[in-house]
Image (spheres, rainbow, N blue to C red):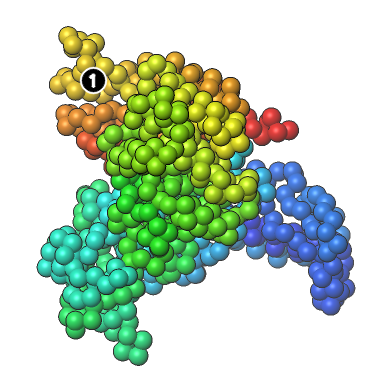
Amino acid sequence: MYQIDRTHRVRVGFARVLLEEFLARAAQNEPNRSQRKSRRNRVCRTPTRFHAENSRAPVAKRTHCGGEKRTHRPRVWPLTRRGHVAMVPAMLLWLLLALVPAPALFAAQPAIKNVIVTFQDGTQQRVDVAAPSQNATTQPASTRPATKPVDPAAAPPARRIEPFLGVNLEALRDYDRQFMFIDAMKTSRKFGSAKTPYDGKATLGPDGWPMDDAGTLVMTDVKNVNGVYHFFASGRCELSTLNSPARVQNLAYDAKRDRTYAEVVVAAESDKQITLSLAFKNTGGAGLRDIKLLRPGYDSDAQVFTGEFLLALHPFGAIRFMDYLRTNNSKIARWDERPKQTDAQYSTEKGGPYETAIQLCNFAGKDAWLCVPALADDDFVRQLGQLVRDQLRPDLHCYVEYSNEVWNGQFQQYKQNKTAAQQEVAAGDQTLNDGGKDSNVEYWARKRIAKRAVEIKKLLGDDPRFRVVLASQVGYQPPGAVLKMQLEYVEKYFGPPSQFFYAVAGAPYFSPGKDEADPAKKKWFTERDDITPDQICDRLLARTGTSANDNVKAFHALADKYRLRKFAYEGGLDLQQFNKHLDVKIASQYDPRAGRAVEDYLNKWYAAGGDAMFYFDLSGRYTKSGYWGLTEDIRDLSAPKYQAAARVSQRLSDTAATVGR
């Protein structure tokens, strides 16, 4: 329905343009074609903006070759004798295009490609509505993906004027629910053997491609992914699917180009979780390279990102790439160790490339939040800065953070930073131990987080687009103690923190809280054996104020004192990680009250003075490990939490627009 409805709107708009053009020529009584051409050469028009209400508000700007702009309103054409004559075919054409059902007129037409949508704030976004493959078999209605994507023409992109709502992305894995890339191989599991593709035992070349027969899990635990996938690879192979509701058809090998082509047809029951596995056999010991598997509806991956993914990002003003970059426990220290766009897969422990993250932000018009690995050397930071300067759109900003939750003992970066602090003191650093007065190694480590953030700012240079964020522990007692120590340290040894940092940030999650019935007052409510969705939702609604509790207020007070912005690098709803009553907890996330709780929680965060929160996460399957996603699947934007976030983002945007006027 999405493609048909969008096509219909475009047809109506196109018909309107034709109608106005007919009438314009009639009213102006243009004598011949050469004069019309001459007139067009003098006036250069920007694309027309179509409003749903078809109002008489300004809908376009006409730019003269001299650069002068003026507002242009649709003309009310006089009904001259010549105009009457032109109106007849124009009206017939308009009625035909606007009223006849889309399938009747466009069943055999090519898909709409490269549509430039111009939004009310002046920004533009290219959106491709891809057509199904010519060789695709029609899916039964019961097995078609049940998606409700947001029409990008329905609302402008999220404004990046503070306050705004950002979002985190989940890590790139074969079981993620982002469907980020048109090429599904980008997030496939590490190549394994042809018989057991999940074992990760394939022999790989330096670029990550298999050097012999191999296999992989392309997608696991996904549903409603039916359709025809286009397979390409350099080299020759026999392609097969293993234990998957799929078949291979039209397998062919082009000897001149040394390329194998095939179609993989997935046909599974509706809403049934499946795994798609591929095996590449009889490669002649040469293996394969440049393997691609394009998702249904795409005959090219030039756009890189799926339309569904881009639409899911629509309400948010910025994207944090912490998990995408596999920041936690990263072993990367040098620039040449980073993930590269030429890598066979982006689902390795290195994560996705910085270049692709920047490409996404450029395409979607979002600010980027990038994390520097804890072990990264100074050259790494300089190279990253140069990459951002060279490739990020000049109207976008780049938030930069030293690793992620370096204070958190469950991650390797905690140990990496602590060890570095000890080594620096041993080498003669007198700032971390305050000239020998401070013997607490834990305090050295906390202060080194701030020190490294200062160094990163200096290495990045004076480009105002770089905005270094000092992220700290918000849940520590007494409130604000860790952040206070870090800011005072910077002020004492380096100067005003505002010279180096754009914002401070914490992670004020909210949850159903502790179980009051527990005699020891230590167990969480979600550990109970008798919980219900009603209880979870009611408790969530009663605890949304934690986004503005004493710990958050202490963070905000320190930010105000040092003239820094107030961010949340993460935030959202937490049900803890207990393997009890998963069905009950999942059901609670689809209750409208969960959406209301998220909305109230976000509103209270901003009302308390917050400038930007980056919700954790955009998407993610709900399991024992967490219920982090605003939606479990980016193709389902009707999820209560996602809708709540979209409403908050729209309210912030409307408020910013009002204040701006």
Classify the position of the C terminus by image quarter. top right
Q: Position of residue 71 (x, y in %)?
A: 80, 49
Q: Position of residue 469 (x, y in %)?
A: 51, 37
The answer to whether residue 647 is seen in the rendering is no
Q: Is residue 450 left or right of residue 533?
A: right
CA neighbours of label 1 inside 10 A, class few (<14), some (14 to 19), many (20+): some
Q: Which of 99 and 534 is in front in this view?
A: 534
Q: Residue 417's quadrant in the figure?
A: top left
Amino acid type assigned to the residue bearing label 1 in the image = Trp
Q: Which residue is drawn at 56% across and 42% down?
A: 467
Q: Is residue 178 left or right of residue 384?
A: left
Q: Position of residue 274 (x, y in %)?
A: 21, 54
Question: Does 75 appear above or below 56?
Answer: below
Q: Count up the numbered dots.
A: 1
Q: Nearer the viewer, residue 74 or 489?
A: 489
Q: Is residue 27 left or right of residue 484?
A: right
Q: What element carries label 1?
A: loop
Q: Which residue is drawn at 27% across and 76% down?
A: 288
Q: Residue at x 46, y 41 (%)?
A: 452
Residue at image mark 1: 524
Q: Which residue ends up furthest to the left in the rendered image?
A: 195
Question: Does 295 appear above or below 395?
Answer: below
Q: Residue at x 26, y 33 (%)?
A: 586
Q: Which residue ends up furthest to the bottom in the rendered image?
A: 256
The answer to whether residue 233 is seen in the rendering is yes
Q: Residue 88's quadrant in the figure?
A: bottom right
Q: Where is residue 284 in the image (x, y as percent from the top left)?
A: 19, 84
Q: Is residue 387 left or right of residue 267?
A: right
